[in-house]
Image (cartoon, rainbow, N blue to C red):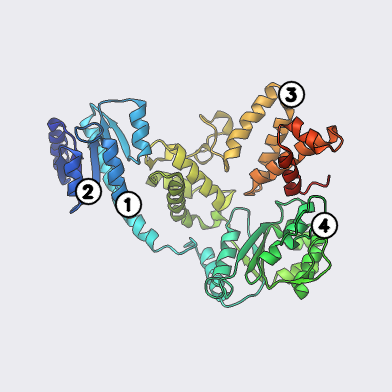
């Protein structure tokens, strides 16, 4: 068993902790300064480190940074006689497992070290398991069926239709299908190009898919390759295909049938060697019956269908997914990854996840920022997982996306001043509607619509005079011209 290391320039603290831990049957090694401890790390490593925050020859926070650089998963408990906010914040930002102010209750200190030791053992097991994880995570039988299907399709270029609820990971499956196909890493290493057909305005979608020629419409000052051309030799992933407008469905069917298409405003046929993978959360058979989706296109896409299970159908995958997302969030944020207690993990595993894997990922990202210590307890979980009604929640419920935290506050401000801020309420409601569908480009959608509305309103007021409109908006002439082109505004 590895030792508990204690570093403190105060001999009495070292003595008391050494005796208390020895009585508990825990091996202990003590140091009077950070320099000696760092030297000892060259030949040995602890299971838990307990460090004072202020010592001659180097602070505990400096030591924390150096130790974490060598042993990222090591639980470090920071002790200090200076119980101030700055010390606590600095300790947690540096990746401390817990913060222990002096003078401390000895049984509590021993209990905390015990908890850190257990967490260290649990993390070692989890780390070993994580090292063996495949590129897609899932031990549930339903996910294993998906993996087997990907394996069977690995030597094929057949069209695939992926169905499943929003947030269930359809694009991940599409990427895996491409990667292991003759067009991906296993073959010619062709491109993987993705487009969410529901996220792009109808007027722009045709140009996005097929490209356009110079002068095809107002603002088209140069020719542009569409996604079909960009994906030549690779795979084109059409997400949310069920929302594609009918006229574009006709064009898509023609491309899938004979491989030819025209750019918007073009007269010469183009060819692109593309494998199409489509995905939708909708019932396409029902859309066909409603007349909203072409039956011939449905049959063209529905060659092989893969159904991706919702997260509630594979709750046994929640622990490994949660650990993976916490690790990834920590890497993105540049902080020490947080760990889940057994109680927190049990609560996470029992939740229904209407937003599926994407919701779990966002919860883990929120926890990486908001959980008060390195070990996440059940009480640290967001209110929706604790069964706390939103109206009585002690803090804003962690949203699926950051915008959900901000927009209700904007809506409240708008309610207080309805004459001048009513549009804010409308924006908040629209954002909530989009977020509830599980879309991942809400920021881009709303930003484009907001900018387009501003520019069109200013141009209307100035009767189309761009320079005057730019002056009114407080932007440059070149900026308004560029925005008109980017947004595809017909002005």
Q: Residues within 10 Å of mark 4 (few under 14, many from 20)?
A: some
Image quadrant in which the C terminus is located: top right
Look at the picture and state if 383 lies above or below 317. above
Q: Which mark lies nearer to you, 4 or 3?
A: 4
Q: Position of residue 36 (x, y in %)?
A: 16, 43
Mark 4 or mark 1: name the one nearer the start of the chain.
1
Would you say the residues marked 2 and 3 are in contact, meaning their CB atoms lie under 8 Å apart? no
Q: Residues within 10 Å of mark 2 (few under 14, many from 20)?
A: many
Quickly name the residue at label 1.
122
**With 249 as the anchor, is 411 left or right in this view?**
left
Q: Residues within 10 Å of mark 3 (few under 14, many from 20)?
A: few
Mark 4 or mark 2: name the one nearer the start of the chain.
2
Q: Residue at x 52, y 68 (%)?
A: 147
Quickly name the residue at label 2.
46
**With 360 as the anchor, is 25 left or right in this view?**
left
The answer, for residue 294, to whether it is visible in the render is no
Secondary element type, mark 2: loop
Mark 3 or mark 1: name the one nearer the start of the chain.
1
Instruction: Work out whether residue 1 or residue 247 is closer to the camera in this orientation and state it.
Output: 247
Look at the picture and state if 97 lies above or below 135. above
Question: What is the quadrant of residue 17 in the picture?
Answer: top left
Quickly name the residue at label 3.
420
């Amino acid at each position: 068993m590895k030792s508990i290391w204690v570093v403190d320039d105060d001999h009495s603290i070292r003595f008391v902790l050494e005796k208390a831990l020895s009585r508990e049957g825990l091996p202990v090694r003590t140091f009077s300064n950070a320099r000696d401890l760092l030297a000892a790390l060259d030949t040995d490593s602890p299971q838990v480190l307990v460090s004072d925050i202020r010592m001659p020859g180097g602070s505990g926070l400096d030591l924390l940074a150096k130790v974490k650089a060598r042993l990222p998963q090591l639980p470090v408990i920071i002790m200090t006689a200076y119980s101030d906010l700055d010390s606590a914040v600095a300790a947690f930002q540096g990746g401390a497992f817990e913060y222990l102010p002096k003078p401390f209750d000895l049984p509590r200190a021993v209990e905390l070290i015990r908890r850190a030791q257990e967490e260290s053992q649990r993390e070692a097991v989890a780390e070993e398991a994580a090292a063996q994880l495949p590129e897609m995570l899932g031990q549930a039988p339903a996910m294993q069926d998906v993996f087997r299907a990907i394996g069977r399709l690995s030597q094929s270029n057949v069209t695939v239709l992926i169905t499943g609820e929003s947030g269930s990971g359809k694009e991940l499956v599409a990427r895996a299908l491409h990667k292991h196909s003759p067009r991906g890493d296993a073959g010619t290493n062709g491109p993987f190009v993705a487009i969410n057909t529901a996220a792009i305005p109808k007027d722009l979608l045709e140009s996005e898919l097929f490209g356009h020629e110079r002068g095809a419409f107002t603002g088209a000052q140069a020719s542009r390759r569409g996604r079909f051309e960009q994906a030549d030799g690779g795979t084109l992933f059409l997400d949310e295909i069920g929302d594609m407008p009918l006229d574009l469905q006709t064009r898509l069917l023609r491309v899938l049938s004979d491989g030819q298409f025209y750019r918007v405003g073009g007269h010469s046929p183009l060819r692109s060697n593309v494998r199409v993978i489509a995905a939708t959360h909708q019932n396409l058979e029902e859309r066909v019956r409603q007349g909203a989706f072409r039956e011939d296109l449905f049959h063209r896409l529905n060659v092989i269908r893969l159904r991706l299970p919702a997260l509630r159908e594979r709750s046994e995958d929640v622990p490994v997914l949660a650990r993976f997302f916490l690790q990834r969030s920590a890497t993105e944020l540049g902080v020490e990854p947080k760990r889940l207690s057994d109680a927190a993990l049990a609560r996470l595993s029992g939740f229904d996840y209407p937003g599926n894997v994407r919701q779990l990922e966002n919860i883990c990202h929120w926890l990486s920022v908001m959980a008060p210590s390195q070990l996440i307890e059940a009480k640290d979980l967001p209110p929706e997982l604790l069964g706390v009604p939103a109206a009585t929640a002690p803090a804003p419920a962690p949203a699926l996306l950051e915008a959900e935290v901000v927009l209700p506050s904007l809506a409240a401000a708008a309610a207080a001043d309805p004459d001048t801020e009513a549009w804010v309420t409308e924006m908040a409601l629209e954002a909530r509607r989009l977020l509830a569908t599980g879309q991942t480009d809400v920021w881009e959608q709303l930003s484009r619509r907001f900018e387009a509305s501003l520019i069109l309103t200013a141009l209307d007021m100035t009767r189309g005079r761009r320079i005057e409109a730019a002056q009114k908006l407080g932007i440059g002439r070149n900026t308004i011209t560029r925005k008109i082109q980017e947004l595809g505004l017909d002005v």
